[in-house]
Image (spheres, coloured by chain):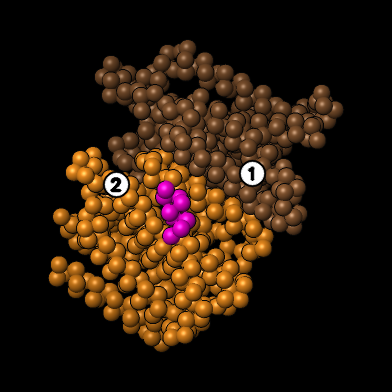
Chain colours: A orange, B brown
Amino acid sequence: MRSRILGWTIGVALLIVLPPVLLALGQPFYVDLVRRIMILAIAAVSLNLILGYGGMVSFGHAAYIGIGAYAVGILGFYGFFNGWLHFAVAMLASALVALAIGAVSIRTNGIYFIMITLAFTQMLYYLGISVAEFGGDDGMRLKRRSELGLVDVNDPVQFYYLVLALMLIAVVLTHRIVNSRFGLVLRATKSNEARSRAIGFSPYPYRLTAFVVAGAMCGLAGALYGNHTNYITPGLMSWQQSGDIMFMVILGGMASTAGPVLGAFALLLFEDFLSGWTQHWQVILGPLLILSVIFFRRGLAGILYKPDA
Amino acid sequence: MASLLFEQLLNGLQFGVMLFLMAAGLTLVFGIMNLINLAHGSLYMVGAYLTVAATQWTGSYVAGVALGLAGTLVVGMLVEVIALRPLYERDHLDQVLVTFGLILFFNELVAIIWGRAALFASGPSWLSGHIDLFTGSRYPMYRAAIIVVGIVVALALWYVVTRTRLGMLIRAGATNRTMVAALGVNIRLLYTVVFGFGAALAGLAGLLAGPIYNVQPGMGELILIQVFVVIVIGGIGSVRGALVGAVIIGIVDTLGRAFLKPLLGTLISPPAAESAGPALASMLIYLLMALVLTFRPQGLFPARGG
């Protein structure tokens, strides 16, 4: 336990001092990169809630990144620039979509669940492509970024610290959720569904609630991502994006607090390294991911810590 | 109007045939090996590329098709032996992740060899004409040939699965793997054969699709997700379900894209239909899937034995 607190303290301290150091070194690109990583880490943390703790293999988590980003874009399109409104709508819309998708898909399990979450996300992807008003296939540029008052999102460093703070809130919140009574039931339905039914817990409402909470959290990541790229395309909801988020969780270590964050950093820094090396980096990344799944089961968090009891 | 409707019905059937060729292999692999294979779309792409390359090399469409199919069969078997064997004892999550890695690999490999731009693929010259329909319109011979190929494959599959020793083993393997292995059947070999078989069917779908759709990296994933919808609707593991699901999805999708916009135009204002029509048409099959799942969570034809 003490080593974990120490680990978090060092990690957060590093992230806090990173922007001034990088700017002093004349590397503003890396401030942007780390900010992008932390935004996707929020998405990975939210996926970990349902995948790692709930056992729900959702292959459609990118849907909520897209919805969050489009919430910012569409509100801006109609002249609403209040950032708090953006965030609220992004989370609410994502929660509602997660409720609809979850209501259908959680009735099934296993392979059906994987295919259905993937299919519904693809539906939203095609929806994004076919709505010409909001850019269709080409996507849309934000008229203006979210206006938050306290924090200026146009300033790369201020935006960085906002993302860092929100990521930490997401981590703490998820930690609290999985250690609450609700979280215990959710984990119980994952480890032994029949037994949790036998002691009187129907898994469905717990799973659906977790699914909706994860969707809302990922919707916030989407709103941040839209502000980060300043440009929104249906590609945010592509199945590759869903797969990427899933790999962050797996590489980092499922059902661990720090895992998704570590995984996001590991995957995206490695992608950045490979893509600087060759444009065909995916031909290397693919087999490496395969090897990591086959031989490296417990993820990065598994090396650093002993697994949760 | 009637001839247009008939023509679109045929187009829907033709698309359904492509979906069926993909879905049959995928559903067999799932039914027997309990394996979810996202890289099935990559095999579709490999089939299309190999056929284009082999046709150029040999100068003959028939030889190109034969080499393309054989090549996809070999690639499929290699994938099974190298990447998928360690996965049979793992959960579906690991299978999804590994086959996702395979997709990245294959898409990039194809881009390295043939480039990212779409390749031009043409059907054989003897299928380039049209046939006259009784409604007075003409239908491309190539698309008609796809429908014929689909019917032949469906019949052949039905024969193999229900009337041959291999089919008996396939059905037995789907019902109780451990028992089949205990009776002395080389289950590993059976897996490799079935996987290669499914890969060849995906390759067949890909090479047929070449002249109609684009041959480019990532082409397999677009159809793969529609194939998932087919399988979910039909019932996982059931070839009959795959056939029915594929025809339903093929026709619903094609008719939706063709007629939803004008149909909506008569109900709501044309400008609104102009934007709502394509949006709704692109969502139609997924909404249909949701509807089916609401009433039959296990699909229309749940496979026997789980």
Look at the numbered disc 1 and give the secondary structure of its residue. loop
Q: Position of residue A116 (x, y in %)?
A: 46, 44
Image point 41% across, 50% down: which residue?
A: A102
Q: Which residues are magenta?
A: A95-103
Question: Which label was assigned to residue A203?
Answer: 2
Chain hosting mark 2: A
The amino acid beneath tag 1 is Val
Where B228 falls versus B118 (above or below)?
Answer: above
Q: Quick one: label 1, few (<14), some, or many (20+) residues within 10 Å?
A: many
Main secondary structure along the magenta-highlighted residues? helix
**How many marks can you see?**
2
Left or right: where A18 falls relative to B257:
left
Rounded to the nearest whole Å, what is the CA distance between mark 2 and mark 1?
Answer: 45 Å
Observer-nearest of B103 and A98: A98
Q: Position of residue A129 (x, y in %)?
A: 62, 56
Left or right: where B179 falls relative to B35:
left
Chain hosting mark 1: B
Image point 22% across, 71% down: which residue?
A: A7
Task: Indicate the quadrant containing the C terminus of chain A: top left, top right, bottom left or bottom right.
Answer: bottom left
Q: Is residue A139 magenta?
A: no
The amino acid beneath tag 2 is Pro
Task: Indicate the quadrant containing the N terminus of chain A: top left, top right, bottom left or bottom right.
Answer: bottom left
Place residue A75 in its image quadrant: bottom right
Look at the numbered disc 2 and give the secondary structure of its residue. helix
Image point 47% across, 81% down: which residue?
A: A148
Where A183 falls versus B232 (above or below)?
Answer: below
Q: Position of residue A44 (x, y in %)?
A: 37, 61
Q: Position of residue B78 (x, y in %)?
A: 43, 35
Residue position marked by numbered label 1 in the rendering:
B215
Where A124 falls versus A262 (above or below)?
Answer: above
Residue A270 can be seen, yes or no: no
Left or right: where A167 falls relative to B59:
left
